Structures are given as C-alpha cells and as structure tokens.
Amino acid sequence: MTATAGLFEWLAEAGPAGVMIYAAAFAVAAVCLVPGSILTIGAGAAYGLVWGTLIASIAGALAATAAFLVARTIARRRVAAWAASHPRVARAAGSSLRRTPLSGRATAAP
C-alpha cells in the first residue's frame, strides 16, 4: 500500500475527525495555492463519489473564506506595497486597498 492510499484509508476510517482534518488541510493547501482539483480528487478517493463531492464542496467554500480573510487582513500591507510599486495595478485597484479590513462594503470603490 502506498503512503497516499494509506492516508486516504486513515481519513475514511477516522469518521468525523477525518473530515475535519481533511477540511483543515484543504483550507491550508488552498491558501498556499495548491490546485483544488488535486484536493477534490483526494476527497473522492477517501470518501467516495457522493460524500467526497459534498465534503470537497464544503471544504472549498471554507478554503475560499480563509483565503479571503488572509488577503484582507494578514497580506493586506504586502499587497498594498506591491500595488503601489506598480502604477497600473494601483490605478485599477483605486481606493479599495485603503479601506479598513472587513468594512462590510460589498461593492467596489468608485
């Protein structure tokens, strides 16, 4: 048995804890720019087609939320500094980089 097959088997046998571990690993991997298709195929291999699809969908939504929160809080200053050094990006972004994190505004800055 390969290490990957052993991991999938362990996740499937771990029950709800395995699902939580998979979802957390999915979120971390997605924030680190690991392709989602690899993670989704892993869910299918570990949990089967139906449960794998459901679990991967929920984990993907949580991963997108985590990536958004990282971008809006932790990485905000780095992105703002990078955009300031690239005038085309700064013009395109407008004032959206100067807003406070999680301001609640759903629309782009005019």
Image (cartoon, helix red, strand yellow):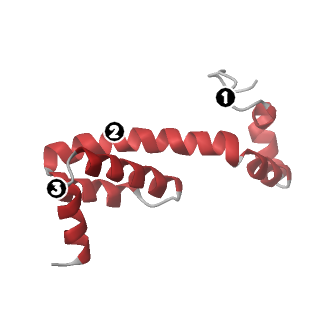
Q: Identify which residue is drawn at 28% across, 48% down.
A: 17
Rounded to the nearest angstrom, the CA distance separating label 1 from label 3 is 38 Å
The residue type indicated by label 2 comes to: Ile
Look at the numbered disc 3 and give the secondary structure of its residue.
helix
Q: Residue 79: x percent and y percent?
A: 74, 50
The residue shown at (21%, 53%) is 14
Image position, residue 13 (x, y; %): 16, 56
Residue denoted by label 1:
102
Q: Residue 9: x percent and y percent?
A: 17, 63
68 vs 19, nearest the viewer: 19
In this rendering, the label closer to the viewer, 1 or 3: 3
| 12 and 91: which is toward the camera | 12
The residue singled out by tag 2 in the image is 58
Disc ID at residue 41: none
Question: Badge 2 local density, few (<14 within 10 Å), some, or many (20+)?
Answer: few
Give the mark nearest the N terminus, 1 or 2.
Answer: 2
77 shown above or below 46: above
Q: Residues within 10 Å of mark 1 (few under 14, many from 20)?
A: few
User: What residue is shown with label 3?
Assistant: 13
Determine the CA span between mark 3 and mark 2.
19 Å
Where residue 84 sits: x, y (%)? 85, 49
Q: Amino acid at mark 3?
A: Glu
Label 3 neighbour load within 10 Å: few <14, some 14-19, many 20+: some
View extreme (bottom): residue: 1
Residue beneath the point at 81% across and 41% down: 91
